[in-house]
Image: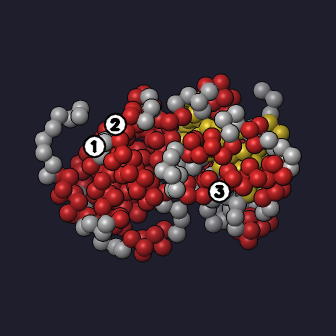
Amino acid sequence: MTPLRTVSVLGAGSWGTALSLLLSHNVERVVLWGRNADELSRARKTRCNERYLPGIRLPDNLDIEVEFARATRATHCFVIAVPSHGFRSALEALKTQMRSQGRSPEQATVIWGTKGFDGTSGELLSKVAEKVLGPEARTGVISGPSFARETAANLPTALTVASNRAADAEMIANWFRTPTTRVYFSDDLIGVQLGGAIKNVMAIAAGISDGLGYGANARAALITRGLSELTRLGLVLGGKPETFTGLTGVGDLILTCTDDQSRNRRFGLGLGQGRARQQVVDDIAQEIEGILTTRELYSAGRKHGIDMPITEQTYKIIFENTDPASAVKSLLSRGPKAETR
């Protein structure tokens, strides 16, 4: 395969940097851009993104760029790794910049590592990308059970790239493969996105349970029933059932619900321990996607008439200040039903 000349990564947090490191194995030049010019300038000098991935050296073919126009000029291939609430604005800025350079946004290939819903419309990010860039643009998502630091440290990892066009997904998966990172491909763009978003809500719920001291039994039940909620909503929205039992469904769900590298789980732990929401957010000091995703997921469940009790109680804890112990009691006091429903 002929190597790509340049791919630009928009978003220089932990995951954007980790994806840049994967790309550097297969792309002649990777350009990494972020909003914090001071941090990026330091990273360019030290060859390390000290805030997000301390101790991990950036390879020579990974260029740090503080100017958005320069970061987007040399390529039609982009990876978006900004928080979900900034996804639309990042695409709109990219579209504007490409047009100012005399290029068509519909000729772009845009992959995102962002996990969540659009904070304004509640839509999946693929729908936002289609509206902003146009239906002809190649778009897709990379997702799966992965913590940025382990991926960046070349520890064994498995991911999935999804696009509406299977040929595009297979081609783009090659961007990210390394000797320690196995990347599968899928044409279930809806299902892969949903798994990546919903698992953050379930990680908050599992963290709350553990923060309350409810133990391994409760955590296992939450993970299993959380998978049921993911599958029920996912099938209604057009996802494929096999996706939810794969890497981007149950795989990502298990990872984020059980390991304290997950910011969403740590947020839930803090709530379960009785700490104030803003105090926990301030202590974590990085984006916690599951907070806004809980709101959008709760709205989606109500809109489509899907029974999502874990999501509902997590929403009430975060946005209605329901006592976590009371929320768990509400879950346990629900009437009996068949497990498969």
Q: Residue at x 20, y 35 (%)?
A: 339
In the displayed structure image, the side of residue 55 where residue 243 appears, left or right: left
Give residue 232's mark: 2
Left or right of 341: which side holds 17?
right
- Gap in Å between the C-alphas at discs 3 and 1? 32 Å
Q: Residue at x 57, y 34 (%)?
A: 162
Q: Position of residue 170 (x, y in %)?
A: 64, 27
State which quarter of the image contains the C terminus. top left
Q: Amino acid at mark 2?
A: Arg
Residue 69 image label = none
- Return the residue nearer the eye: 11 or 250: 11
Q: Residue at x 66, y 29 (%)?
A: 168
Image location (x, y in percent) of residue 92: 69, 53
- Label 1 neighbour load within 10 Å: few <14, some 14-19, many 20+: some
Q: Label 2: how many residues lie within 10 Å, few (<14), some (14-19) or many (20+)?
A: some
Image side of residue 33 versus residue 118, left or right: right
Q: Residue at x 35, y 64 (%)?
A: 318
- Mark with earlier residue (3, 1): 3
Side of 220 where 49 appears, left or right: right
Q: Position of residue 40 (x, y in %)?
A: 74, 65
Q: Position of residue 245 (x, y in %)?
A: 40, 32
189, 296: nearer the viewer: 296
According to the image, label 1 marks what residue?
A: 307
Q: Amino acid at mark 1?
A: Asp
Q: Tell me which amino acid carries mark 3.
A: Ser
Residue 134 visible in image: yes
Residue tagged 3: 89
Question: For numbered disc 3, what is the local secondary structure?
Answer: helix
Mark 2 touches mark 1? (CB < 8 Å): yes
> In the rendered view, would you say 182 is above or below 36?
above
